[in-house]
Amino acid sequence: MPQTDRSEDTERIALAEAWLRQDPDPETRAELSAIVDAVRGGDPAASADLADRFDQRLAFGTAGLRGEIAAGPNRMNRVLVAQAAAGLAAYLIEYGELGQTPSVVIGYDGRKNSSVFARDTAEIMAGAGIRAILLPRLLPTPVLAFAVRYFDVSAGVMVTASHNPPNDNGYKVYLGGADHGSQIVAPADAEIAAQIQRVADTVLVPDLPRAVFETAAESMIDEYIRQTAQVAAPPPAQPRVVYTAMHGVGWQTMASVLAAAGFDPPQLVEEQIEPDATFPTVSFPNPEEPGAMDLSFARAAEVGAELIVANDPDADRLAIAIPDAAAKAGYRRLTGNEVGLVLGWQAAERAAAAPGDAGPSGALACSIVSSPGLEAIAKAYDLDFEATLTGFKWISRAPGLVFGFEEALGYLVNPGTVRDKDGISAGLAFLSLAAELKAEGRTVADHLDAFVERFGCHDSAQVSIRVTELARIDEIMARLRAEPPASIGGIRVERVDDLADGFGALPPSDVLRIVLDGGGRVMVRPSGTEPKLKIYIDAVSETGTVAERRAAASAAVTALEAGMRELVA
């Protein structure tokens, strides 16, 4: 190995030894010690591993922290979490109201180390002089989002990695006060990140003061259940339902909410109902992934279910599946756009039925990569419409919000209770719709046809182009900007909107919006979490029968997908 590499190894070993001296976790200490020994022995793989762990730091941004549980500053571990907690505490003290003690509520899910990270956070926050409240047990992310408002605290922390791989964990931050319990946005993310870096540079974790924290009473959870149950009227019929928690924390809370709302208990996918950090029955604990809902389909076929309701592991997302004779398993999962449009229609109907002489009021909102069909609903009901950047940190801030969604299975149906996506309340809202349809002798599939008849067929698809070199994504985006296509898949391009410098009310974002003849649209953006270019395709057909509309929109999506694959090849 060249001398320069050996010199870099020596520097990294020194950093690793300093890290070991402040790491309270015997598992990650043993892991890192073994890597250091291997580097000293000349192992090139160990040297590369050490470089990956210590040459950069896991970045704190608007999504907080998220990464693999392992040793080093570029991984999730107790050292990193302690530094994050101390940095967030310093931010709350610096930016809090004069004369008032800052406060924080902390929740955690069933992933590996979630409870440990949450307790570390609570102790360090309390040691910094922050009023720290720890939720009493593992709970869904939306319960923590609710708790921020319930306790009227300065901030909330949820320890979760949502539907990431089993050995990942994360740290999501919410703000109270004027932010009303929404996730952080700029500039708060950079200000918190600066405080975390200051702590990492100047304080050893064993020297951070710790103190006793409060534990929230069960009454807070009871209030979440009570308010969430109000999303639905008493059901006029009882659909046959199968439910899965995807090895996460959703079931106990969902069961209580359903009971409070008057629904019969669903049939369960027993193998997936209890929290299990290893996620043994799925290769990837995300309802969107192929195979993730296979056990749900099998259980539904056994009991003749009319509906499948699935939450992701921290229960902030919702997946719905319905019977479909054309599907191999007899059931098909609805897309996030299909569920979002149906729930948006339901929200618009409720807004129209609200008391008052002024007519419907409020706004429907979705991310810019979600279906334009929501705007069609808003226009039909004379409601406002907001298209935001991706993420509920933006959707939840839409003025006058009554409903919001994003195509990645996220739905906000009760903004007066939770300012984040909530798979529990959204699941109840969909069940309420299914119950109403059953009482009328109709199915969800019938309702989807009625939507197409009323608003047109809004079909969509998503393409992910994985790259080995991140520079490739920059090259593709630069080429599309420099040489915008005149047509895609034989469909004429009307214009290309570049959001790099902001567009209208939208902040700057590395996104291209390609508007097509006939109402179609293609959105292109780099993934924020993976080495992928993401392409979102939408097409609409408003003429002909329901079947003809579906066929026309599907054909347009197919042509656009083929055209985009050729364009970015």
Image (tube, rainbow, N blue to C red):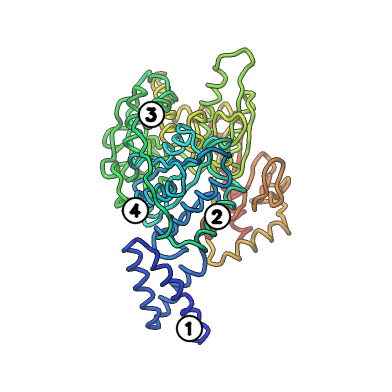
- Tell me the kind of residue under disc 3: Ile
Which residue position holds label 1?
A: 6
Residue 563, horizontal then vertical, whole percent: 62, 53
- Tell me the kind of residue under disc 1: Arg
Which residue position holds label 2?
A: 195
Question: Does 164 sit above or below residue 13?
Answer: above
Question: Does 417 sit above or below residue 99?
Answer: above
Disc assigned to residue 225: 3
Q: Nearer the viewer, residue 517 or 91?
A: 91
SS for dot 1? helix
What's the distance in space between the residues labelled 4 and 1, CA to CA?
A: 35 Å
Q: Say whether disc 4 or disc 3 marks the residue closer to the N-terminus.
A: 4
Q: Nearer the viewer, residue 156 or 563?
A: 156
- Tell me the kind of residue under disc 2: Gln
Which residue position holds label 4?
A: 112
Residue 316, horizontal then vertical, whole percent: 44, 40
Name the side, left or right, on which 266 lies relative to 98.
left
Q: Name the residue at 51% across, 87% down.
A: 3
Q: Tell me if mark 4 has few (under 14), some (14-19) or many (20+) residues whose alpha carbon lies within 10 angstroms of its own.
A: some
Q: Say whether disc 2 or disc 1 marks the residue closer to the N-terminus.
A: 1
Residue 283, horizontal then vertical, whole percent: 35, 54
